[in-house]
Amino acid sequence: MKAVAMPTVSRVAVCGGTHGNELAGIYLVREMLKKRADGTEPVSVVTVMSNPRAAQLCVRYVETDLNRCFTRAALSAPVSETSPYEMIRSQELNALLGAQRSVDLLCDLHNTTANTGLCLITYSDRDWICLHICKHLQREMASTPVRYVHFDIPLNEAYSLDSVGKHGFAMEIGPQPHGVVRSVIFSAMQEGVQLMMDWICQFNSGTLFEGGWVDVYTMVKNIDYPRDSETHMISAAVHPDLQDRDFCLLHPGDPMFLCFSGETLRYRGKEALYPFFINEGAYYEKGVALSLARKRRVQIPSVRSETLR
Ligand SMILES: [Zn+2]
């Protein structure tokens, strides 16, 4: 494959606290905000506390999930003082980071209670910048598994903050309970952000990054908890054989749920798929016990910035 020349990544946004109880990103952003730019940085970085009210209260959101408020419809909806706080805040963030002044790369920091390691979650399986950053993290991070997760929905239906940048991803790291910061998770996030910045600086200065292959996990579907047909309350928990086994292949017939009555329910799909976000604490309200993904290898070209041409 021929090397692809791409525009430099000059304006970067690092956002935390989009969910106000995901503490690694909140504390990392607070650390970054302490270090004032002195104008000598090779890349302009804007650091943002996305949902300060929720972070103050240490809740996921105040009125509605901010990270579902970045659809085109939500961003263009008329808002007033009585609109949900997050609807107003998403439009403020879009004005700051998206719209006409779109940042080149938006990294939004998240935590999950699931045992995912570090995931870059994107809407594209052919964004060479995001894929190269993922490859760089995979090469450099010895103690944390790094994976690329692709939500295959059209960009105009994208709902999350990272979608307002020209390139963007959620950097999702787990396992960490919400409302808690664990040092191993914090350090992994700090290292991930630093490695991302290192890659961007090298890319902007003309380094050629060799192509290769990256495993891409494309989300196929969500699975809800089994529910009582009358009360709709959940009637089972994730099976112990599946708990914490994010990104371990789930085969048809494998145990999936253990009912409160003692019965084991098995995966009934025809295709072996990769489970992730297993038993994520914030998704009980969304009716999601886990998500399933298909893995494939994507070939990525060598890239370099356009500046040296
Ligand atoms: Zn989150």
Image (cartoon, rainbow, N blue to C red):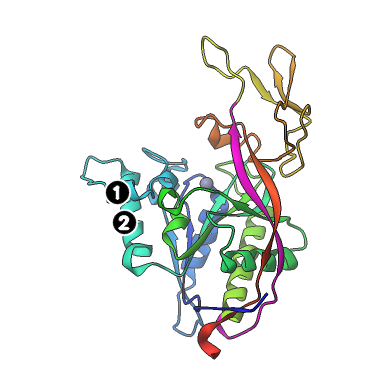
Q: Secondary structure at mark 1?
A: helix
Is 7 colored magenta in this rendering? no
* Residue 133 percent coordinates (x, y): 62, 67
* Residue 268 percent coordinates (x, y): 71, 26
The answer to whether 250 appears left or right of 44 in the picture is right
Residue placed most toward the observer, 15 or 199:
199
Q: What is the crowding at mark 2: few (fewer than 14 residues within 10 Å), some, or many (at least 20)?
A: some
Quadrant in the rendering for residue 303: bottom right
Residue plotted at (52% across, 64% down)? 31
Q: What is the crowding at mark 1: few (fewer than 14 residues within 10 Å), some, or many (at least 20)?
A: many
The numbered dot on residue 88 is 1
Is 221 colored magenta in this rendering? yes
Q: Are marks 1 and 2 in contact (CB under 8 Å)?
A: yes
* Residue 119 percent coordinates (x, y): 63, 53
The numbered dot on residue 92 is 2
Looking at the rendering, in which quadrant would you find the N terminus?
bottom right
Q: Residue furthest front?
A: 1
**Chain part drawn in magenta:** 204-224
The numbered dot on residue 166 is none
